Amino acid sequence: MKRALILLLAVVLMLMCGCAKKTEEAPQTEPTPAPTEPTPAPTEPPTQPPTEPEEPELINPLTGEPVEALTTNRPYAVAINNSYGAMPQHGVAQADILYETLIEGETRCLGIFYDMASQTEPIGTIRSARRDFIRVAMAYDAIFVHKGLSPKQGTQYDKYSAQVTFEQTGWDHVDGNNEAYRYFYIGRTEGYAAEHRTFVNPDKVMEAAKALGCTMTREQSLDVGLQFDEEAFFVGESAKKITAYFNLSSSYDNKWTKFTRLTYNEDTGLYEASQKHGGYSSVGAYVDGNTGESLSFRNVLILHTPIETLKNKNGWMKIDVTGEGEGYFACNGQMTKIKWSRASESDPYTYTLENGTPITLGVGKTYIAIIPMTGHVSVE
């Protein structure tokens, strides 16, 4: 019995060992991982082509009008007859800026042409130079064009002559009375006095300037600091009709009454000019003889400055064209008071509102009247 029990235990132990061995030898399996989304390959950020900087718009620095190219040729300032017996003028409508101011007994004009090479129509009639007209031309580095000048007289007033001004400054000029006479021509005879007949063509005046040894070009295109905007909006008083009087006297009903009137045309946005000459009762349309069209301007500037008649035998005018003063600016049928300044003859003119803000001109041509302190300005 005891022996049988021992055998039974041995069998049980053998069975248990066998089961344990099979359990140890069973292959071990790893758990199946859950499926994952494939990781996308990194992509390069899209490359943008380099952007070209926008070309600045090229504009005429005297009008703000677009031009195909800026020129480094010097501008020209042309002394243009404004006598009653010389009307109509020719070429004044092509001037970028047209000045009018006093000479002895009447007014005279100075046309500033930014690019004479682009002009094709004759200019005239050409008249003589005055000291302060030359000094205005210097504001634009302009070659001065004239026929004759106020000469030295051997008196204390010689410093106010155009002849001395040219000698002292060496300013480039083309005089139709001297070496350059052959470049000018007589454009009309019947009914006109001799002093009202001389013209010049744009190509010939440039040819004359070169022949006389004038400096023809600048290092860079002209910049006189003017700002332009097509709208040129500002708040001012209504100015549909502006009349600028050039009288040295405060009396406006005397025999010598010279004024220029500028009437606003709502359809064109321009001021159309007319004028009354001293000693004549009629107010005449101001037209360009090349086209027969009214002389029109986008901008009107009227500058008050001290003007006096010198006591020499010719009664030359002494006009302050440097320094500072007050005046008016009109554009788009509105007018406002302004201040003007010019530090020296080598500087351009600066125009600001009364609060010191630089004015913005409308795009287009400008008429500038330089009138005495007593010169009246009426506005309707």
Image (cartoon, rainbow, N blue to C red):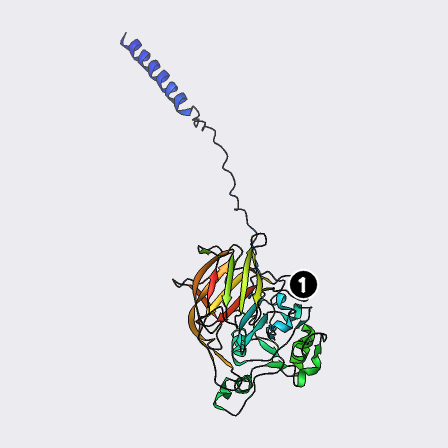
Residue at (45%, 56%) from the top-left corner? Answer: 237
Residue 102 can be seen in this image: yes
- Residue 72 located left or right of residue 159: right
The percent position of residue 327, horizontal first and vertical second, equals 45, 66
Residue at the farthest top position: 1
Residue at the farthest left position: 2
Q: Residues within 10 Å of mark 1 (few under 14, many from 20)?
A: few
The percent position of residue 277, horizontal first and vertical second, equals 57, 70
Residue 59 can be seen in this image: no
Residue type of the residue flagged with mark 1: Gly
- Residue 333 located left or right of residue 356: right
Residue 186 or residue 275, whichever sits in front: 275
- Residue 145 located left or right of residue 349: right
The number of discs equals: 1
In this rendering, the answer to whether 192 lies above or below 357 is below
Residue that mark 1 sits on: 292
In this rendering, the answer to whether 372 lies above or below 58 is below
Asked where in the image residue 363 lies, by quadrant, the reply is bottom right
Asked where in the image residue 57 lies, by quadrant, the reply is bottom right
The percent position of residue 334, horizontal first and vertical second, equals 48, 56
Residue at the farthest bottom position: 154
